[in-house]
Image: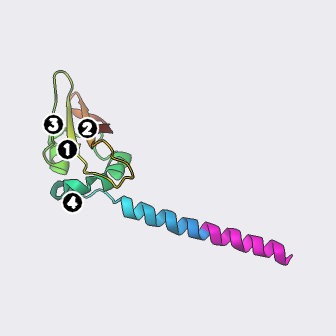
Amino acid sequence: MINKLNRTYKLVLLFFIASIVTYSLISLFEEPFDTDQWKSNWSERHKMVDDLIESRLLIGRRKNEVLQLLGNPKNTSKGNKDFFTYRLGNPPSFFNSEPEYLMVVFVNGKVDKVTLAID
């Protein structure tokens, strides 16, 4: 019985440590979206991009609303493609990664899709 309690204690302790490590990593590499921080510090945008995409905050908004929230884009529409792109900075990586951008795609003047794009 003592051996069984020991094993249970170890499993609980392992789960507790894994939870703390997971929470620490998430809070280190991700932040909630903040308009002022997005506009003022483009090199840290990679920390907010997951929250921005997952929250679907931009879906259905018009261009002027997107400009108010995100500021001026790096690139805009080309040809028949209607989109904005925003630089995200360089997230921490063990490898030399391609620069990533947030791509906001418009259909009929409203945001239809928000996704990551690689240069």
Q: Which residues are magenta?
A: 1-15
Residue 48 visible to an observer of this rendering = no
Residue at the spot x=25%, y=48% of the render?
A: 88
Task: Please give the label number shown on residue 66.
Answer: 1
**Residue wearing tag 4:** 37
**Closer to us: 88 or 104:** 88
Which element is circle 4 on?
Answer: helix
Separation of marks 4 and 2 at Cα, in angstroms:
19 Å
Separation of marks 4 and 1 at Cα, in angstroms:
15 Å
**Residue wearing tag 3:** 75
Task: Find out whether the residues at labels 1 and 2 contact each other: C-beta distance under 8 Å.
Answer: yes
Separation of marks 1 and 2 at Cα, in angstroms:
9 Å
Where does the image place residue 77, in percent across and percent down from the top left?
16, 30
Residue at the spot x=76%, y=70% of the render?
A: 7
Where does the image place residue 1, in percent across and percent down from the top left?
86, 75
**Closer to us: 90 or 49:** 90
